[in-house]
Image (cartoon, rainbow, N blue to C red):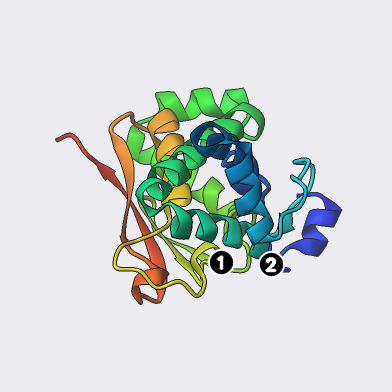
């Protein structure tokens, strides 16, 4: 963590990939006019350059604008943006030697090591929320800023699920998938993410 990031830690900031990996999907799905409309509604007049953490509220508003404008596409696009964020993390944030080690260890041990690393870097995706590792395969995010103030009849954290699914499938076991049985938007105290082995 850089000195600037340490200073900003806890100040309602989130990693820029929550925007940067979503925008190309908006372009391909609805075109530049639609993307610009959503970004303007969110208060994101300029794309982040990817070099620093960014304020979480405009990011949340962009994801919320997508859900409100195209509820039929929001889960798919949010999940794809999460997968793309996972790919960015694999390419730029986790050393190749560490990735090789995780892939050859027994998957239960790899899951424990990966969940520890995720918790250590939670400030990049949790914003002002509080992240907790319940077990190596279960996480909770209290006061998740990306769904703050929203009310829904189903979990909304598709971007987070996409990130966790990509990391666990690539580094731990290809049959692991992240599910969200509980969400702040559905009235629960925390968004709960469970990494499940989907094939017996």
| Residue in view at x 21 percent, y 39 percent | 198
Instruction: Check disc 1 and report the residue beneath it.
Output: 145
Q: Nearer the viewer, residue 76 or 107?
A: 76
Residue at x 35% of width, y 77% of height: 187
The quarter of the image holding the C terminus is top left
**Residue 45 visible from this viewpoint:** yes
| Sequence order check, earlier mark of 2 and 1 | 2
- x, y percentage for residue 155? 34, 61
61 versus 21 height, above or below: below
For residue 177, which numbered disc appears in the image?
none
For numbered disc 1, what is the local secondary structure? helix
Residue indicated by mark 2: 12
Residue 109 horizontal/vertical position (percent): 39, 39
**Image-based side of 28 in relation to 77, left or right:** right
Residue at image location 74% in from the left, 45% down from the top: 47
Image check: 51 left or right of 126? right
Q: Are marks 2 and 1 in contact (CB under 8 Å)?
A: yes
* Residue 45, x across and y down, in percent: 76, 52
């Amino acid at each position: 963590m850089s000195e600037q990031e340490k200073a900003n830690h806890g100040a309602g900031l989130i990693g820029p990939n929550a925007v940067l990996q979503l925008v190309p999907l908006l372009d391909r799905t609805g075109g530049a006019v639609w993307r610009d409309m959503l970004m303007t509604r969110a208060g994101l007049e300029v794309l982040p350059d990817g070099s620093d953490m960014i304020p979480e509220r405009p990011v949340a508003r962009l994801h919320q604008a997508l859900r409100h404008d195209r509820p039929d596409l929001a889960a798919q696009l949010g999940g794809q943006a999460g997968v793309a964020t996972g790919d960015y993390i694999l390419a730029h944030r986790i050393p190749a030697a560490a990735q090789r080690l995780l892939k050859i260890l027994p998957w239960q041990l790899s899951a424990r090591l990966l969940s520890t690393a995720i918790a250590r870097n939670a400030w990049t995706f949790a914003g002002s929320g509080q992240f907790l590792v319940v077990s190596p395969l279960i996480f909770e995010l209290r006061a998740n800023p990306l769904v703050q103030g929203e009310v829904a009849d189903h979990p909304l954290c598709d971007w987070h699920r996409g990130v966790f699914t990509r990391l666990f499938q690539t580094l731990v076991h290809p049959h692991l998938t992240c599910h969200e049985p509980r969400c702040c938007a559905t009235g629960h105290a925390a968004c709960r993410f469970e990494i499940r082995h989907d094939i017996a």
